[in-house]
Image (cartoon, rainbow, N blue to C red):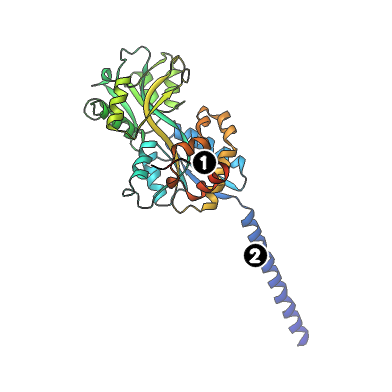
Amino acid sequence: MRLIRLRNHWLILTLVVMLITMLWSLTISAQDSPTQVILGTATQGGGFQLFGQNLAEVVNAADSSLEVKALATRGSTENISLLETGKIDIGLVEGNAAHQVLANPEPSPTRLKVLFVMYPNPGMFVVRADSPDRRIADLTGKPVAFGTRNSGLRILATNLLDGIGFNPEQDFTPIILEKAADGPRLVLSGEVAALWGAGIGWPGFVKVANGPKGARFIAPSSTEIQQILSKYPHLKTMSVPANTYKGQDQAINSVGLWSLILARPDLPDSIAYRLVGAIHQGQAALVQRLAQGQYTTLENTMENVYPENLHPGALRYFKESASRLPVSK
């Protein structure tokens, strides 16, 4: 009987040791596993989808403790909703869509925060080089592709056009796209007169400019820019540098805002801090992949985002990395 008891004792002891070892292994494994971060981008063929995929790969390479996964979404408007409900951790949001949330807390009681800037988004139209249209007024009454339903660029289009007395729904024949990649195809085929877009190295503009007919870009005149800024002072004057697109030998002036990387309000400070550090450390690699990456810097973030709009984890990184922060208005 005593022998049986001893055997049972050793069996229980062995099982306990095995259980402790297994739990310890699982704990170590969990600690070694990278932190997953879901990044909301946009539809295929647009600038956000391209930027987001490259950003994820650069961040993952810069910090092995992070695993950023780019998730295709319908664009800025949906990204804001997904951030507010916690379905994504960070999301790419066009400047005007972000401005509506950051400037007015009512639409977003959860108070989304900025992690980093992306790049400036000067808005303009592209037509084929053989098009007779040279001014925005020339496009009135014609079919124009204004982007996808959830794209923040449509907000910019509405503000820009309203600033010079036009309504995209009434003065044009608006074509709303299922995905961003459809826009340049419609211009190249002649099914629409123009495509609205924004940004430096925007994929839709690149495709039209590289097409067999070449491209011409239509932006507001200097007088129209002043009219727009008078009615929408939150917008900024921005330029597309010469030779950004094939055949574009002069700079193009327009208006727009910086697109931003926003974070869900309850994203842990430690994760936000690591993400900002990885973006900063991987910026040179991002530039090698995308020309737009040259704008994704700490300096541009500090210059264009007020401290109260930054995620606390991002703000801590900036405070440790720079001697000054932007002055609040």
Q: Is residue 11 above or below residue 36?
A: below
Q: Which amino acid does label 2 sit on?
A: Leu
Q: Is residue 74 visible?
A: no
Q: Distance between the residues labelled 1 and 2?
A: 47 Å
Residue 318 placement (x, y as % from top left): 53, 44
- Residue lying farthest to the left in this orientation: 170
Q: Which mark is residue 304?
A: none
The structure residue drawn at horizontal position 70% and vertical position 68%, both measured from the top left corner, is: 18
Left or right side of 63 for 113 = left
Residue 49 placement (x, y as % from top left): 46, 35
The structure residue drawn at horizontal position 38% and vertical position 43%, both measured from the top left corner, is: 78
The structure residue drawn at horizontal position 29% and vertical position 22%, both measured from the top left corner, is: 224
Q: What residue type is labelled 1?
A: Arg
Exactly how many numbered labels are in the figure?
A: 2
The one nearer the camera, 240 or 2, is: 240
Q: Is residue 186 above or below residue 232?
A: above
* Residue bearing the label numbered 2: 23
- Residue lying farthest to the bottom in this orientation: 1
The one nearer the camera, 239 or 288, is: 239
Say which of marks 1 and 2 sits in front: 1
Q: Which mark is residue 324?
A: 1
Q: Is mark 2 on a helix, strand or loop?
A: helix
Q: Which of marks 1 and 2 is nearer the N terminus?
A: 2
Left or right side of 260 for 222 = left
